[in-house]
Amino acid sequence: MPAFDRAAASASGAASSRFSRRRFLGTASAVGLTAAGLSACSDSGAATTDSEGRTVVEWWNIQTTEPSQSVWPERAKAFEAKNPDVRIKLVTLENEAYKSKMTALTSSGKLPDIYHTWGGGILEQQIDAGLVEDLTDSVSTLTGTLVPASVKAYQFDGKTYAVPFDIGAVGFWYNKALFAKAGISAPPTTWADYLDAVKKLKSAGTAPIALAGKEKWPGMYYWAILALRIAGVDGMQKAADAKDFSGDDFVKAGEHLKELVDLEPFQKGFLGAAYSTPTGEAAAMGNGKAAMELMGQWAPVVQADAGKGIGKDLGFFPFPTVAGGKGALTDVFGGGGGYAVRKGAPKAAVDFLKFFMSPESDRVLVTKSAMMPVVKDAVSALTDPSLKAVSDTLGKATGFQLYLDQAYSPAVGQEINDSVAGLIAGSKSPEQVARSVTQVAKSQ
């Protein structure tokens, strides 16, 4: 899952836990785990007890920033209070250490009772290896209470293998004041109107789009969502299954992106710009130096941290549709975080997840940890206007596409990022992007 490594989002305090995709895997330092910690993971089928005879459920998570770092233990203690015969043992790791340890544990066939997952290709590999519990029946009463899009990344062949605790979507964050100055009365809903808006912003002397060209993954979003709008959710799945992205839909995605690039819409020096630095993409938006950025729900927090933030001038709109495309405006591109259970884990592991994602508990996560709600009955707990806009988009989702560097193998995800970066820089054609991605996909 390499794309998560590339954002160094650095907001602090309550804000830090909001950028679920970037912060989860964007932390700079790695905290090791002792050999004893590794050996504590149970063998498949075995349960452990402590000196008091309580069933021990080991829960690996990556909530290393406040307030989540405190809220997660609080949730564990709340469950233990209701289930005195169970002890929840938290193992909290920085994401780099987590990924490293999980790679080793997956190879050994020994996973924690409950562990963090982003779904997609890595989870599917663990499922294929027989290491993951099928939760379909045991959480059937829970899944019906969840925002449908939040579960998609953890479902394979009609079965559910993880429970989400956060979900987000990528869309355009825009400066309402700069739009008004350029004479744009409403956010564009079609690609043609979007390009027209870019031209108007340039004419008004404003950089239309902020982009962190140095980090590649922000540019990937444009090609990925254009492909989603043109091919549709089914078309994206067919291409993934066939490991073939050379079709017209994917070439057209590159052609439309090139249309945008040819307008020279990005801020000065974008090819060398990082995402969350004081001179990067988020700062350009946060300081009112650019009118738009294509980013996930963590964007407002990082804009305010890297720059000043633009407050009430900040708005959000979905990625526009493409004429003749099979995708809908309500098809969402995004992802989040969830928890899977190892094969043969004690029943208490599933019981805890059902407690953790109850409406009452999810409201705690939303209000105290600034998580996006995944339980329908917890949506009302969301008060931040920017996050409510994203939540509304998720609630209306007619289709869901997981981040491509999560949905596909790490090698394919990296190739998409590299090839699209080449297209944006002018060194690759739309056809070359589609061909390169297909070649890597077929090699896996």
Image (spheres, rainbow, N blue to C red):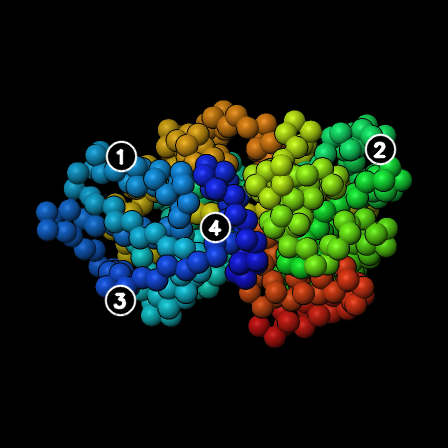
Q: Would you say the residues marked 4 and 1 are in contact, meaning their CB atoms lie under 8 Å apart?
A: no
Q: Amino acid at mark 4?
A: Phe
* Element carrying mark 4: helix
Residue denoted by label 3:
35
Determine crowd level at label 4: few under 14, some 14-19, many 20+ residues with C-alpha closer than 10 A.
Answer: many
Q: Which residue is mark 2?
A: 182
Kind of element beneath mark 3: helix
- Asked whether the viewer can see residue 93, the reply is yes
Q: Residue furthest right?
A: 203
Residue 77 as seen in the image, left or right of residue 84: right
Q: Residue at horizontal 55%, vertical 28%? A: 384
Quote the CA–CA distance across marks 3 and 1.
29 Å
Q: Earlier in the sequence, mark 4 or mark 3?
A: 4
Where in the figure is residue 98, as x and y percent of width and height? 40, 59
Q: In this figure, which residue is indicated by the disc labeled 1?
A: 78
Percent across and percent down for residue 437 are 68, 67
Q: What x and y, as percent, mark residue 344? A: 28, 56
